[in-house]
Image: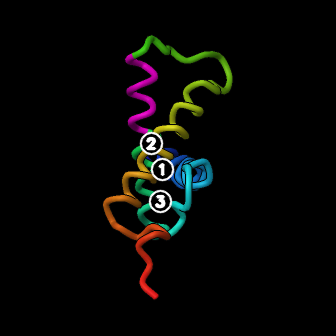
């Protein structure tokens, strides 16, 4: 059940990460956005716990903000690596 939760959270966090990514980073495929979101959830959780986060009762907003920031960084990296940003479009 936790894997399904990570996938659903990854879809949402990936789209949020794509939304907050600086510049025009919206030309990567949706499957890559979802992978960035899943990576953001997993890596964000590790970063959060590495800096002393131990969760709280209810929704832990700091953990989700860290996941969104990590997903945004992964979206920027994916856009740069795939070379599908707006500046590399051919006319």
Tell me if mark 1 has few (under 14), some (14-19) or many (20+) residues whose alpha carbon lies within 10 angstroms of its own: many
Residue at 41% in and 63% down: 32
Question: How many numbered circles are shown?
Answer: 3
Quarter assignment of residue 52: top left
Residue 86 in sight in this render: yes
- The residue range painted magenta reads 42-50
Q: Which numbered disc covers residue 79?
A: none
Are the residues flagged by discs 3 and 1 in contact, CB closer than 8 Å? yes
Q: Is residue 84 left or right of residue 64?
A: left
Q: Nearer the viewer, residue 83 or 51?
A: 83
Are the residues flagged by discs 1 and 2 in contact, CB closer than 8 Å? yes
Q: Which residue is mark 1?
A: 37
Residue at 61% in and 16% down: 56
Residue 8 in sight in this render: no
Q: Is residue 15 left or right of residue 77?
A: right
Indicate yes or no whether the magenta region holds residue 85. Answer: no
Q: Which residue is mark 2?
A: 40
Q: Secondary structure at mark 2?
A: helix
Tell me if mark 3 has few (under 14), some (14-19) or many (20+) residues whose alpha carbon lies within 10 angstroms of its own: many
Dominant secondary structure (helix, strand or loop) of the stretch shown in magenta: helix
Q: Which residue is mark 3?
A: 33
Instruction: From the top left corner, tell me how far across and down residue 74 is, in percent.
Output: 41, 48
Q: CA distance from mark 3 to mark 1?
A: 6 Å
Residue at 41% in and 70% down: 84
Q: Secondary structure at mark 1?
A: helix
Q: Secondary structure at mark 3?
A: helix
Q: CA distance from mark 2 to mark 3?
A: 10 Å
Residue at 37% in and 57% down: 78
Instruction: From the top left corner, tell me how far across and down residue 25 is, in percent.
Output: 51, 60
Tell me if mark 2 has few (under 14), some (14-19) or many (20+) residues whose alpha carbon lies within 10 angstroms of its own: many
């Amino acid at each position: 059940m936790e894997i399904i939760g990570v996938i659903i959270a990854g879809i949402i966090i990936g789209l949020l990460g794509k939304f907050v990514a600086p510049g025009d980073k919206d030309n990567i495929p949706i499957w890559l956005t979802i992978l960035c979101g899943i990576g953001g959830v997993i890596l964000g959780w590790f970063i959060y716990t590495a800096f002393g986060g131990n969760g709280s009762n209810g929704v832990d907003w700091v953990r989700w903000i860290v996941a969104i920031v990590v997903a945004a960084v992964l979206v920027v990296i994916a856009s740069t690596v795939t070379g599908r940003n707006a500046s590399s479009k051919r006319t």
